[in-house]
Each structure stands twice: as structure tokens, then as C-alpha cells.
Image (cartoon, rainbow, N blue to C red):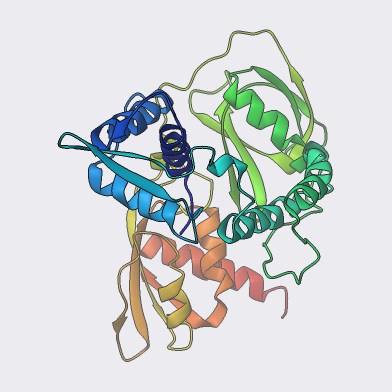
């Protein structure tokens, strides 16, 4: 069982109530205290019901939790709850097995960022966690991530993240692949996205009406400026990426239904890792398995299709089919 932030708040609230010698707590009182703490964290929280509260208490009593010993006693018709040992608190207990495993997992994830300039604090934090909780980080490495530690521009991630959070206008020295020299761009950052092991920054360039995206590996320098920050009031980035593969949203194209057939050997890969969330279930035909997706065609989609080589055949629409065929023919000229 994983412990979420809300669950941890509830456990510590119950711990405080169970160990309070100056007040009695019924199940209704405990529920009120937990929901009060949750609403302080999020004013829109609907809180929890009694069933969840009972589950929380059972978890705290279990070996996976803290093995707490609860005493129930009556006053009139009301049942009250408290620790049998009033000096007990989960805050005073050693890390249990579940918590230790969660900390170990967190350390493994944090280890990914060692050596990156903006995550220098990780180098100090990991040995402190290891020493404080008697954890060993020298065990076999059981998880790897598809990251590119040599990618240019990742040193700007922390600065850009903070600029988005604190709504800071930036002047970015940026050199696209089409220019020979960097250009200074006034930029209002809104969103960071990773695609194909590269990072992209989305925001407002006052020179254009629409959202602009910048590849972090093309950024030379970033400076904070005092220009008034233009807030994002119109773009929901979940919706922005909904109809595309990758990060490029063409402004002159609409969503189309792209149909393709794949050979039987490729079908399981396409099925388990869809090209796009709109992908239809497979249908078997004589040539292979047929799929379709509903997307706005862009360069990233072309690259994905071409990456499957001879195992995929685009059926339509005709303009996209012709575009893929043209790129294949141009590629063939490199070899003949």
C-alpha cells in the first residue's frame, strides 16, 4: 500500500488525536479533525467518509503501518478512541518496512539527477537519507530510465520551472537550426514538456499571436527581465497536445483520420504502445492488421510512421499517404 500526501495527513491527524490527553475523540470527532486538516490543504476537498477512516485506523494497527495499540472506551453511549500507551506516537517510531522501501525507491529516482547542475543538492541529500534511515543505496540497480544525460539545455530546467511557477518574464538567447547566430527573444514561459528524450519550453513570444515552443538544447542563455508577465489565459496544455503526436501543433491543418495496415509481427507493438490515444483496436485483414488514428499530421508523426519501415503501410488520407511515399522515395535516393 502506497502512502499518498492526503493519507499521510490523515495518519498524523489521527496520531495527534489518539495521543491527546486533554480531549476525548469519538469516531465523528476523528472524522471532523481529519477533514478539517484536508480542507486546510485544499479548500475544495470533499474530505473522507467513515469507511475510509476505519480503513486508516486498521492500516495504522497493521504491521505494514505502525502496529498501534488502540483502546476503545465508552462514556454513556459514545465510544471514544485513544492510544493504550498515552506516550506512544507514530512520530517516535522507527521507519517501518513499507516506508523504507518507499524511501529507497525515491532515492533511486533522485539518483537519476546526480551530476546535473540544478540538482546538486541531490548529491548531499542521498547520503543523509541513507544515514538517517539506515538504508543501503549500494544494492543492485533495478530500474533504468530512458534519459539523455548528455543533452544540452537540461541545465536550464530548474530555472525555467521556477520562472513558470513565479510568472517571470525572460530574455532568451536562442539559436534555431535554421539560423547561424543566436537571437534574443522576449519570452513569457508557460509549460515544459519532454518528448523523444528532448525538452521543450512553451510560452508567449510577443512577436507572434500563437503559442511558441523552444527546444532547450537550442537555448544559449537566459536572463530575467522586468517586463510585465503576460499570463496564460487561453491555453489548456492537456488539450493543446490532445490531437498531435509530439510537440508541434500545425496551425493550418485539421484533425484527420489516418488509416494504416501493419504486418502481423508489428501489430502487438502498435497495440501495446499506441501511436496516439485515439488509436482504434486492431482489425485483421489479408495484408495484416488495420488501425486508424485521429490526429493533426505533423513532422513527429511522419517520423514515427517512417520509423516502422517496411512493416507499416499508410492507406489514407491521400495527401498524407503521398507525403510518406515522397519521403521514402527521397530516402531511397541516398542508397541508389
317 is higher (above) or lower (below) than 333: above
Residue 223 in percent (x, y) is at 77, 20
Residue at position x 77%, y 61% from top?
136
| Camera-nearest residue between 120 and 280 | 120
| Camera-nearest residue between 302 and 335 | 302
Task: Left or right? Give the position of 80 relative to 172.
Answer: left
Is residue 177 visible to the viewer in this orientation of the structure? no
Is residue 137 visible to the viewer in this orientation of the structure? yes
Residue 38 in percent (x, y) is at 38, 31
Q: Quadrant of the C terminus?
A: bottom right
Task: Left or right? Give the position of 265 relative to 195.
Answer: left
| Camera-nearest residue between 150 and 219 | 150
Residue 330 in percent (x, y) is at 63, 68
78 is higher (above) or lower (below) than 100: above
Residue at position x 41%, y 55% from top?
59
Residue at position x 35%, y 23% from top?
43
Residue 41 in percent (x, y) is at 43, 27
Task: Left or right? Give the position of 194 relative to 10.
Answer: right
Residue 153, by quadrant, is top right
- Label count reads 0
167 is higher (above) or lower (below) than 72: above
Task: Left or right? Give the position of 108 relative to 52.
Answer: right
State the residue lying farthest toward the left. Answer: 77
312 is higher (above) or lower (below) than 49: below
Residue at position x 51%, y 68% from top?
305
Amino acid at each position: 500500500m502506497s502512502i499518498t500526501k492526503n493519507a499521510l495527513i490523515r495518519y498524523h491527524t489521527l496520531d495527534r488525536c489518539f495521543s491527546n490527553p486533554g480531549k476525548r475523540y469519538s469516531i465523528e470527532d476523528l472524522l471532523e479533525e481529519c477533514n478539517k486538516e484536508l480542507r486546510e490543504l485544499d479548500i475544495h476537498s470533499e474530505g473522507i467518509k467513515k469507511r475510509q477512516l476505519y480503513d486508516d485506523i486498521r492500516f495504522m494497527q497493521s504491521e505494514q503501518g505502525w502496529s498501534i495499540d488502540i483502546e476503545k472506551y465508552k462514556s454513556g453511549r459514545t465510544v471514544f478512541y485513544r492510544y493504550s500507551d498515552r506516550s506512544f506516537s507514530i512520530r517516535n517510531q522507527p521507519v517501518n518496512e513499507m516506508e523504507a522501501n518507499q524511501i529507497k525507491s525515491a532515492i533511486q529516482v533522485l539518483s537519476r539527477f546526480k551530476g546535473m547542475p540544478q540538482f546538486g543538492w541531490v548529491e548531499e541529500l542521498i547520503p543523509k537519507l541513507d544515514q538517517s534511515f539506515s538504508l543501503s543505496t549500494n544494492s543492485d540497480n533495478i530500474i533504468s530510465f530512458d534519459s539523455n544525460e548528455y543533452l544540452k539545455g537540461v541545465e536550464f530546467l530548474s530555472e525555467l520551472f521556477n520562472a513558470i511557477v513565479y510568472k517571470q518574464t525572460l530574455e532568451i538567447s536562442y539559436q534555431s537550426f535554421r539560423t547561424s547566430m543566436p537571437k534574443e527573444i522576449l519570452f513569457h514561459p508557460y509549460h515544459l514538456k519532454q518528448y523523444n528524450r528532448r525538452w521543450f519550453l512553451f510560452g508567449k513570444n510577443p512577436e507572434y499571436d500563437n503559442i511558441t515552443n523552444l527546444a532547450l538544447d537550442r537555448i544559449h542563455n537566459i536572463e530575467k527581465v522586468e517586463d510585465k508577465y503576460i499570463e496564460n489565459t487561453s491555453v489548456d496544455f492537456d488539450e493543446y497536445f490532445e490531437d498531435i503526436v509530439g510537440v508541434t501543433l500545425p496551425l493550418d491543418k485539421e484533425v484527420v483520420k489516418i488509416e494504416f495496415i501493419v504486418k502481423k509481427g508489428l501489430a502487438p507493438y502498435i497495440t501495446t504502445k499506441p501511436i496516439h490515444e485515439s488509436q482504434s483496436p486492431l482489425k485483421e485483414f489479408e495484408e495484416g492488421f488495420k488501425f486508424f488514428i485521429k490526429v493533426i499530421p505533423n513532422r513527429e508523426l511522419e517520423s514515427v510512421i517512417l520509423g516502422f519501415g517496411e512493416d507499416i503501410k499508410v492507406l489514407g488520407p491521400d495527401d498524407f499517404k503521398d507525403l510518406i511515399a515522397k519521403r521514402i522515395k527521397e530516402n531511397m535516393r541516398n542508397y541508389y
